[in-house]
Image (cartoon, grey):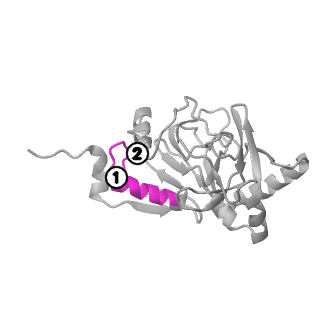
Amino acid sequence: MTSQVPESLHAVLDRPLTVRPVAGRVGAEICPVRLSGDLPEDVVARLRGELHRHKVLFFRGQHHLDEAGLLAFARRLGDPGRVPSSGQDGGAWHTDASYTERPPRATLLQAVELPSRGGDTVWANTAAAYDALPVELRDLADRLWAHHADPSGRADHPVVRLHPETGERSLLLGGFARSIVGLSAEADSEALIRLFQDHVTRLENTVRWRWEAGDVALADNRSTQYRVVRDFGDEPRHLRRVTLAGEVPVPVVRRG
């Protein structure tokens, strides 16, 4: 009797994974791979390692994945949350749900319905942004905390967090960062947030992805921010989303 190889394994058994960097500091396309909940553990481990290195991974042609399939793949990487029905991923730079005590560790997006043109998503590498700061600004950022807020919640986080798996330092800000903790002057808070945020979103730290139907993006939410390019007017744009449960951000310098 011939043993049956699950369809999702064929690509990874036939050819080794190829990693193609998309930009200089962030983002890589992975192929060939057919994402599913039954990928071999060594392939899943390889994807985790590439995610730590490139911060965002892109997978073309994942048309076979429905909502259940995306969740099954997400469970191989962590504890998934609910998939929102809207699937919209925001028009301003942000780290997903940074207004919660434990922001998600990662975000998966899958292109379901796309406009005829436009609607790209741009990611920024917040670890590269931190590394590129002058040493005086790194020392300042290491000591700061920011207040993040949204109608859904609020939380204080260090402006610089330590990645729990790689030990990298990255800037934790984005559109939900409302003020710097301990500064009474609103203008001073805004100026500091803008200073560091401008370093995050420098073009050198970003990658822009032009979606095709079926594409999946996997982003490390602990070392990235992202935003939608809203140049598609009133046309529909639906991206399926899964987030993975995260940790309380660890600061470089403890408060108190």
Residue at 61% across, 36% down: 88
The amino acid on which the numbered mark 1 sits, given as a three-letter code, is: Glu
What type is the residue that disc 2 sits on? Answer: Arg
For residue 36, above or below residue 11:
above
Whether 37 is among the magenta residues is yes
Left or right, 74 with reference to 126: left
Against 23, residue 38 (above or below) is above
Q: Which residues are magenta?
A: 31-52
Front-lying residue, 3 or 106 = 106
- Report if the CB atoms under discs 1 and 2 are less than 8 Å apart: no
Residue at horizontal 47 percent and vertical 62 percent from the top: 20
**Does any portion of residue 60 appear in the rendered image?**
yes
Q: Is residue 11 left or right of residue 247?
A: left
Q: Residue at x 51, y 59 (%)?
A: 52
Residue 214 position (above or below residue 193) = above
Q: Is residue 150 left or right of residue 7?
A: right
Between 120 and 90, the one lying in front of the other is: 90
Residue beneath the point at 74% across and 38% down: 149
Asked whether the viewer can see residue 28, the reply is no
Quadrant holding the C terminus:
bottom right
Q: Which residue is mark 1?
A: 41
Counting residues from the start of the chain, the first of labels 1 and 2 encountered is 1
Quarter where residue 239 is shown: top right
The residue carrying mark 2 is: 76
Say if the magenta span includes residue 50. Answer: yes
Question: Where on the picture, by quarter, is residue 202?
Answer: bottom right
Q: Residues within 10 Å of mark 2 (few under 14, many from 20)?
A: some
Secondary structure found at label 1: helix
Spot occupied by residue 246 in the image (x, y as percentages of width and height) = 56, 45
Q: Is residue 197 left or right of residue 204?
A: right
Question: Tag 2's secondary structure?
Answer: loop
